[in-house]
Image (tube, helix red, strand yellow):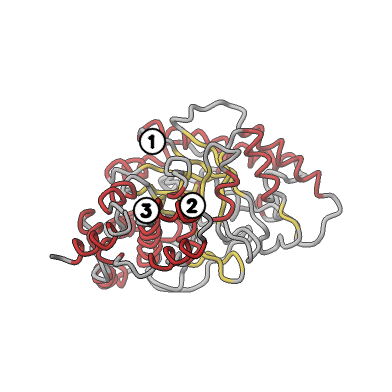
Amino acid sequence: MGAFELAEEAYAALGVDVESALARVDRIPVSIHCWQGDDVNGFENNSALDGGIAVTGHHPGRARNADELRADLDTAWKLIPGPKRLNVHAIYAETNGRKVSRDELGIEHFSRWIDWARANGSGLDFNPTCFSHPLASDGFTVSNADAGIRDFWIRHCIACREIAAGMGKTLGTPCVTNYWFPDGFKDTPFDRLAARERLRDALDRIFAEAIPREYNLDAVESKLFGIGAESCTVGSHEFYMGYAVSRGKLLCLDAGHFHPTEVISDKISSCLLFLDEILLHVSRGVRWDSDHVVTLSDELLAIAQEIIRHDYDRRVHIGLDYFDGSIDRIAAWAVGGRNMRKALLLAALEPASLLAAAENAGDNARRLALLEECRTLPFAAVWNEYCRRCGVPGAFDWYAEIERYQKDVISKR
């Protein structure tokens, strides 16, 4: 009897059907973010990274153009099991060397991304890029007091929404379009309300046109603070929670966008009592929103458990969002993507019926003992079998492909 069959027996003793868990997890897509591959540089090359975002590290081999970025993604795709989507920012438009203003971008500037996604059987997700631009230099975009600047960013977001709808329609799967704005005050403002009124009204203009949900899903993302916006972020959690509930939008919860003592796993069930769907940006903040590579932490497992335990498989859209320029960028994709999938599989392998029965009976000692027992069940054998079925390397075998690609491709850039 092999390791997987022994693992099946161990889980079955607690009432867990391993095959059902594998099948369930393999139906949940994870959206991989393109910007890890080039340190959020994009293809405009006209402005330094700003908006409270910072990428640290100078590991060699950053993707310098779309072809290199797609080649790197091809390698990452071969190392991450399960269904995947690709998340693209507007600054990754391909304009054939022409300078195209962000408010004039169209679906034609993303045709090669659509072709790549179709070839890989992946959906696309999308984001307006409201940072790293001269008209964002004062720290305000759609809530800017200057109507001309505000209108530019509104037009950009409307253009992105149309692009996203085209992506969703072409690929036959809804594009989740996420709106995040860096707008905020470095020091304590006298008037917080005016900026928030402008943000609300700008969003209403952006979303004025009805777009079928089978093509596009709009999500709005809050943040606690950013570099240069430490004292007041216009788009706070409370602002976007109210906006999402009142306007029927998805709320995006980013793991790095709250106080260090807050976790988004605790927010998921509360939000979904009042919202149809939410978007997650799974990241790892270290002391601040530092966007470290996702590890298999207690919080990552708690996020996955909330999704699995409450049957939120179709109501929670999972996206990764981190950027580490200090290590091999493809390895960063693979580590984070594999860990997100591991967390989902671990959650699906919980003895849910036994845990629920213990909790409902008030037997908290039994519940605790069961949860602790799960930590030492033979998960690795199930994970390796899942990887084998998905045609990707299991255990640590996947890193050999990273080393090969470093030698054959990265070292020559």
Residue 205 picture quarter: top right
- Sequence-first tag of 1 and 2: 1
Helix, strand or loop at disc 1?
A: loop
| Local secondary structure at mark 3 | helix
> Residue at point 47% right, 41% down?
315
Q: Position of residue 347 (x, y in %)?
A: 40, 56
Tell me which residue sits at (83%, 55%) in the image.
189
Query: Label 1 to label 2, Cα distance in Å?
Result: 24 Å
Dot 3 amino acid type? Ala
- In the image, 44 versus 158, the foreground residue is 158
**Which structural element holds mark 2?**
helix
Q: Residue 91, percent across and down?
A: 50, 50
Residue at image mark 1: 173
Q: Which amino acid type is shown beneath numbered disc 1?
A: Thr
Which residue position holds label 3? 348
- From the viewer's perspective, is 6 left or right of 182? left
The residue identified by callout 2 is 306
Can residue 408 be seen here? The reply is: no
Task: Give the class, few, some or many, for how many residues have Cα within 10 Å of label 1's Cα (few <14, many ≥20).
Answer: some
Crowd rating for badge 2 (residues with CA inside 10 Å; few <14, some 14–19, many 20+): many
**Residue 102 in view (yes/no):** yes
Earlier in the chain: of badge 3 and badge 2, it is 2
Which of the two discs, 1 and 2, sits closer to the camera? 2
